[in-house]
Amino acid sequence: MSKSFKIVVPTDFSAGSLAVIDWVKQIATEHQAEVHCITAVHQPMIYMPMMAGAATASIPTTDQLNQLSQESLNIFIEKHMSDLGTTPVAKVVVGRPANEIVDYAAEIDADMIIIATRGHSQIAHALLGSTTEAVVRGATCPVLTIRSDE
């Protein structure tokens, strides 16, 4: 029995991340692939106010962020991938996005990651960093990058 072809599709729910949808559908259909949509949640950081008596804002817990992200991911799948023929796996991970995407792809033995890239200039890239670049460098499977217009 052959193993199923698995595609990991990271999203941050931005308009730019939608650039991959047509490619995901085409490749998933051609390979009868199992699609895994993934989003990463950063753990909330709590900074102590420098001034005594300063008001502090309510910071959501990791569980709250996880639940909200899971709901958003389910809506994303329903809105953009309902015509795939199979329901994609929806996975929320906690941590630095690039690391979590690479780790998840390795964990499920993915055959491919399809991820959007914004195509920043070199100066912006140096200042902002690139999740996509880190995924390309760290992944053990092929990574298809799709440039978005965002």
Image (spheres, rainbow, N blue to C red):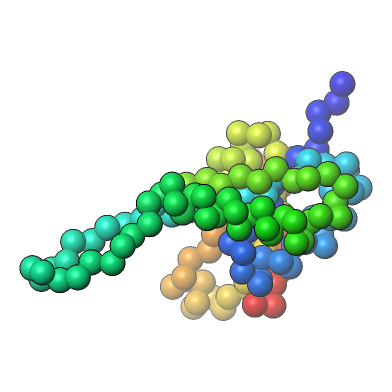
* Image quarter hosting the C terminus: bottom right
Q: Is residue 22 left or right of residue 72?
A: right
Query: On the image, which quarter does residue 80 sit in?
Result: bottom right
Q: Give residue 105's position: percent from left, percent from top.
A: 63, 41
Identified at 19% across, 70% down, the residue is 55
Does 121 appear above or below 63? Answer: below
Q: Residue furthest right?
A: 30
Q: Is residue 34 left or right of residue 141?
A: right
Answer yes or no: is residue 100 visible: no
Identified at 49% across, 49% down, the residue is 66
- Seen from the viewer's position, the closer of residues 49 and 139 is 49
* Image quarter hosting the N terminus: top right
- Seen from the viewer's position, the closer of residues 81 and 115 is 81
- Seen from the viewer's position, the closer of residues 147 and 9 is 9
Identified at 51% across, 72% down, the residue is 125
Identified at 47% across, 47% down, the residue is 94
Q: Give residue 88's position: percent from left, percent from top.
A: 75, 46
| Total numbered labels placed on residues in the image | 0
